[in-house]
Image (spheres, rainbow, N blue to C red):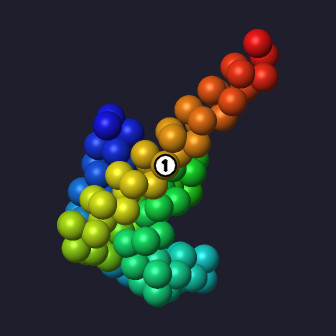
């Protein structure tokens, strides 16, 4: 839950920044985020990239409902995969 709240904090912080084109890389990431919408936040669990995606979702003023849903689902799926791998590893060990 704390991880999701951290991602939402980045979305809120992103809403304080104006949307402006800074570099070619920034333009590509923004176009990708606009194309796929809040579904890109399923990748919000990734180190560094996830924080940037959350921040840009705020900059682009995406709707709250889909943002919260996709962000929380992406982070939850990460922990489900980690837990499953841990349980599988413990079964192998014994």
Q: Residue at x 49, y 49 (%)?
A: 77
Residue 79 in sight: yes
Looking at the image, which is closer to me, 10 or 87?
A: 87
Q: Residue at x 47, y 61 (%)?
A: 42
- Residue 35 picture location, percent across and down: 46, 87
Q: Residue at x 43, y 71 (%)?
A: 39
- The residue where tag 1 is placed is 77
Looking at the image, which is closer to me, 65 or 90?
A: 90
Residue 17 in sight: no
> Is 84 on the left or on the right of 40, as rendered?
right
- Residue 14 picture location, percent across and down: 31, 62
> Residue pushed farthest top?
94
Looking at the image, which is closer to me, 16 or 47?
A: 47
Q: Is residue 81 above or below residue 40?
A: above
Crowdedness of circle 1 by 10 Å Cα count: few (<14), some, many (20+)?
A: some
Disc 1 secondary structure class: helix
């Amino acid at each position: 839950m704390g991880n999701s709240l951290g991602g939402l904090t980045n979305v809120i912080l992103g809403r304080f920044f104006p949307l402006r084109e800074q570099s070619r890389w920034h333009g590509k990431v923004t176009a990708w985020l606009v194309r796929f919408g809040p579904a890109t936040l399923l990748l919000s669990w990734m180190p560094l990239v996830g924080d940037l995606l959350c921040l840009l979702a705020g900059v682009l003023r995406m709707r709250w409902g889909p943002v919260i849903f996709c962000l929380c689902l992406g982070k939850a799926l990460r922990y489900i995969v980690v837990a499953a791998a841990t349980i599988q590893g413990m079964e192998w060990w014994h």
